[in-house]
Image: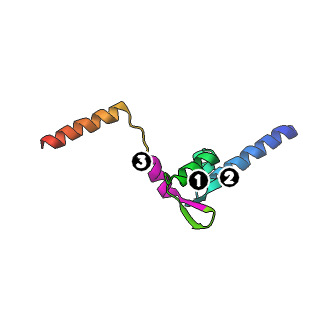
Amino acid sequence: MTPIQLQQELNEIKKLVHQNYINNKEVFNSTELISYLKISESLLYKLTSRKLIPHCKPTNGVLLFFKEEIHDWIKQHRIYTVEDAQRMIRNHKRNRNN
């Protein structure tokens, strides 16, 4: 294995270890959430400033995000398939007739 290949392997291992560390956390800081969601820093700050994403600001300037709340937020913004929509309509009609 060449030194370049070895360095590439080490970089990949470091990346995987870092991702695993983030995935196992219950509370994220801004940098960790950006990595977790794979979004830009500017998008995160737009979401927080407009109060569109759940977050805490226990001290001046430090933003924290609870993983469970982020998962709930993601689920609230789900895009339903056509089949999902048809199923919901059928269920609504069935419940309305009962």
Coloring scheme of the render? rainbow
Residue at far front of view: 50
Q: Sort mark 2 into few (<14), some (14-19) or many (20+) by Cα contacts within 10 Å.
A: few
Specify whether residue 24 is in view: yes
Is 20 placed above or below 8 here? below
Specify whether residue 1 is in view: no
The answer to which of 43 and 66 lies nearer the viewer is 43
Tell me which label, 2 or 3, sits earlier in the chain.
2
Residue with the mark numbered 1: 23
- Give the structural element (helix, strand or loop) at label 2: helix
Label 1 amino acid?
Asn
User: Mark 2 against mark 3, which lies toward the viewer?
Assistant: 3
Tell me which label, 3 or 1, sits earlier in the chain.
1
Q: Quadrant of the N terminus?
A: top right
* Magenta stretch encompasses residue 20: no
Q: Which mark is residue 76?
A: 3
Quadrant of the rendered image containing residue 92? top left
Decide whether the magenta segment is chiefly helix, strand or loop.
helix
- Give the structural element (helix, strand or loop) at label 1: helix
Q: Sort mark 3 into few (<14), some (14-19) or many (20+) by Cα contacts within 10 Å.
A: few
* Magenta stretch encompasses residue 74: yes
The answer to which of 82 and 45 lies nearer the viewer is 45
Q: CA distance from mark 2 to mark 3?
A: 28 Å
Tell me whether the residue at label 2 lies in contact with that at label 1, contact meaning CB atoms closer than 8 angstroms: no
Residue with the mark numbered 2: 18
- Give the structural element (helix, strand or loop) at label 3: helix
Image x and y of residue 28, in percent? 59, 58
Image x and y of residue 80, in percent? 38, 37
Image x and y of residue 46, in percent? 57, 49
